[in-house]
Amino acid sequence: MSKIDYYSEAAHGPHEIFDLGNYQLESGVTLPNARIAYKTHGTLNAAKDNVVLFPHMWSGTPKAMEIFIGEDRPLDPRKYFIILPGQFANGFSSSPSNTPPPFNGGAFPRVTIGDDVVAQHRLVTERYGIQRLELVLGWSMGAEQTYEWAVRFPDMVKRALPFAGTAKTTPHDFIFVRSHEDALKSDPAWDNGFYKHQSDVHVGLRRHAQIWSVMGLCQDFYNKEVWREVGFTSLEDFLHRFWEAYFAPMDPNNLIWMGWKWRHGDVSRHTGGDLAAALGRIKAKTYVVPFSRDMFFPPDDCKAEQKLIPNSKFRVVDSLWAHFAMFCMTKSDRDQIDSCIRDVLAEPVG
Amino acid sequence: MSKIDYYSEAAHGPHEIFDLGNYQLESGVTLPNARIAYKTHGTLNAAKDNVVLFPHMWSGTPKAMEIFIGEDRPLDPRKYFIILPGQFANGFSSSPSNTPPPFNGGAFPRVTIGDDVVAQHRLVTERYGIQRLELVLGWSMGAEQTYEWAVRFPDMVKRALPFAGTAKTTPHDFIFVRSHEDALKSDPAWDNGFYKHQSDVHVGLRRHAQIWSVMGLCQDFYNKEVWREVGFTSLEDFLHRFWEAYFAPMDPNNLIWMGWKWRHGDVSRHTGGDLAAALGRIKAKTYVVPFSRDMFFPPDDCKAEQKLIPNSKFRVVDSLWAHFAMFCMTKSDRDQIDSCIRDVLAEPVG
């Protein structure tokens, strides 16, 4: 364990806070003093037409998306005003780990992708007066938020770029994400979410990491021992120092609440369960980009949704890192992802 | 829970017993009064040249393989003498669940695929005086035993038919099988294998079933709701009445010990780690038959091994049931599998 608290600016850099006040969640529960923590890069121009919104993935924070921002990159902060909103339950925005009673820990209300996106909508419109977004993009749960944006606010989203995620969670995703939540809950120290310190649940966090290692990557990755290329010396070394180390400092409840949110993602709740109708609403120029060996979001599952999106293209990022191509552990992964961002930004949009 | 004990002839039909006496395991430990329980169908002919050996999969017993035997099927008991040997730890052969102290329950020694195959070799040679096998076939762990037979006793195996399994466990298989074992062990009631009754560990058995449901089938299976075709009414209904019900009556230790055996399967331990050398030993006419959507043994993993087997063919069974095509829930699965058995038996072999 690091001596720095994981959910701290010391570890994740400075955030800004947007206060939502008494925020009514999709569940009907009102969360008092709700907030989202976010980061920005670049400067909002006078016309307010240079905005990119880039929500983050499950288990992440806005910091995770900063690896795609740079003056030599498509997300150039000299050109764009890039907002990295933190999703609920990420440990910085309102979360089980930082909310006072009665909604502390295991009593935190269920939150949804819709709750995230409505809060982000308030942030961009109320704080910044932004009416249109040049691009909304995201990976995994970030893709879920991207789809929710494009379906819910079709006139605001000019371009959408969901990487390795779906607009409606598939049943297979539903059961594997739940199995991850259950791995954390299986530790008696989890105690229905009312442990004292996150490290009390270290057995559950390790169990969860081991299960993640199975579907999080893919057969080819392990067959080819790709972990060697990034400095690990054996399979067990990789399991401990990559997977267990990644999850060890995190808060189990935060992961569980984000997981619940993930597996209930479904844009078709706006259209009475009709996914085609929901995706048919999208006006954004959309690139649907799965990763070739992703066991969570196989290209076929993404292709099925792309066919329902009017003005869309289908591209595949080819990587041995499966769902984790977005970590950009190889130059090839980074270049392919950057190309998608560059190309979609170059698409002429009315 | 059934009122009939699961590991009983009332539930699984009559078995014969082959006593191995003090049986030295590959680990160096000697298991006293070791035995394998087995079934046979058909009659051994005078020339002893009509023998088929059909070991079973993880979690199974010889009964599971009986669905492939019939007078209208390639495995016709009027023609062949079919031996269905029970693997160690299956609950009928020597197992954690049926062995007296000091090797009871959690103290049962580790057993290997090699231990199974050497015991089966003694059965066929000592009890029956059989010198050659027309066919050795098996599914999953049965495929592991098939490969072990073909590599270890190349002059005895005329034909080999491994379905949906590998000769050397891949690292991905290793970690997912271990995650299944860990799900059982995560239940405090498991108590290092020294519970009183298997149903004491029902929470672990349920957890294990839920995790199995993720990789045991595949995305397409759940997307297309194939469970409807076999009488389930919802995803949750399927998870409870198929997956949990399947594992509920089983003994957690038996599953764990078979799992350990599975993930340590590796014919290359006969050749100092050289898989090509090991598979190069095979003299049997071999059909390597993966299942198209199998997430445990993807066709590519099987193809890589098939290329190393001198006199082999590669065929793929196409099924939405993924690894469980062998359950023959559809006529198509049964017909494709029967075709493989029929065709390999028709192969002229010297």
Image (cartoon, coloured by chain):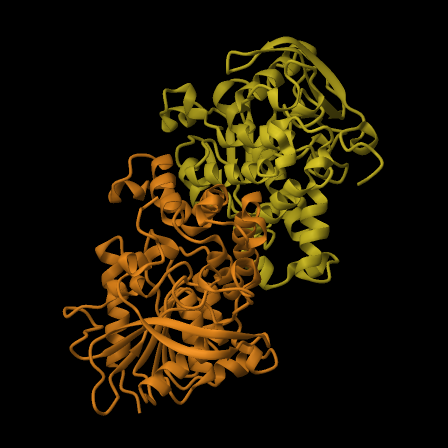
Chain colours: A yellow, B orange
Residue B165 sits in quarter: bottom left
Q: In which quadrant will I find the N terminus of chain B?
A: top left
Left or right: residue A191 versus residue A144 is right
- Residue B268, given in percent of the width and then of the height, sits at 55, 77
From the viewer's side, name the closer residue of B305 and B209: B209
- Residue B132, given in percent of the width and then of the height, sits at 33, 88
Find the residue positioned furthest to the top. Answer: A22
From the viewer's side, name the closer residue of A182 and B93: B93
- The residue that appears at 71% across and 60% down in the rendered structure is A229
- The residue that appears at 63% across and 29% down in the rendered structure is A253
- The residue that appears at 34% across and 69% down in the rendered structure is B315
Residue B113 to residue B310: above or below? above
Residue B67 sits in quarter: bottom left
- Residue A120, given in percent of the width and then of the height, sits at 62, 18
Q: How many labels does the image show?
A: 0
From the viewer's side, name the closer residue of B154 and B262: B262
Left or right: residue A88 versus residue A92 is left
Q: Is residue A330 visible?
A: no
- Residue B246, given in percent of the width and then of the height, sits at 36, 49
